[in-house]
Amino acid sequence: MRAPIGRTHLRELVELGRFLDVRVDAPEGETLYKAAEPILWSETARALVVLAGFDLGRAQPIEPRKSTAERVYSRWAAGRAPSRERSPVISLPDAPWVELGRALTVGYRSDKFHARGEAKDYEHRFGPRVVAASCSQGNRSVLVIRGGSLRLTPHGIEG
């Protein structure tokens, strides 16, 4: 399958918290995928993204002009600016993508409604047509969750 986000690079990624797991309705039955990586939002791809084995570099200061990613994060986190924005351009592996199935839930840990560092676990149930796909190359792997009406709002992840 071709890249589910229709691009080979990602930019303006904002970290939402720590990814815990995604539950997928796969052809072989319901499957749980776990990882301990940052969960990121790409507004341009309208997708949740988990990157493993990538050097995201140090967080860059956010420029005075708000980026799309910062505006979306601020709306999602009740007006609070992100503590860091992932600004490097991420080149996705040039490897085949595997559609894992319809995404049912995602679990993540975030301090979005609490003081920085006071994180809480959340679980979001996805609506119809949200799918999970992944690809791997060497020690790098990417998990993308997108589709349906997936978006970030002041209430959190919706769709």
Image (cartoon, rainbow, N blue to C red):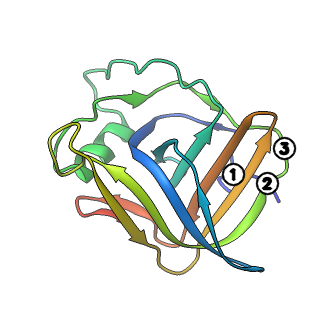
Q: What kind of element bears circle 3?
A: loop
46 to the left or right of 142: left
Residue occupied by mark 3:
95
Location of residue 91 with respect to 28 vertically, above or below: above
Q: What kind of element bears circle 1?
A: loop
Mark 1 vs mark 2: give the one in front: 2
Residue lying at 41% horizontally and 21% vertically, measured from the top left: 59
Circle 2: is it few (<14), some (14-19), or many (20+) Cα within 10 Å?
some
Asked if labels 2 and 3 touch by Cβ distance under 8 angstroms, the answer is: yes
Which percent across, then down, holds residue 56?
54, 25
Residue lying at 42% horizontally and 45% vertically, measured from the top left: 18
Question: Which mark is first along the chain, 1 or 3?
Answer: 1
Residue occupied by mark 1:
6
Q: CA distance from mark 3 to mark 1?
A: 14 Å
Question: Which mark is first along the chain, 2 or 1?
Answer: 1
| Image quarter of the N terminus | bottom right
Which residue type does callout 3 highlight?
Ala
Location of residue 59 with respect to 145 vertically, above or below: above
| Image quarter of the C terminus | bottom left
Residue occupied by mark 2:
97
Which image quadrant is residue 89 in? top right
- Report the number of discs: 3
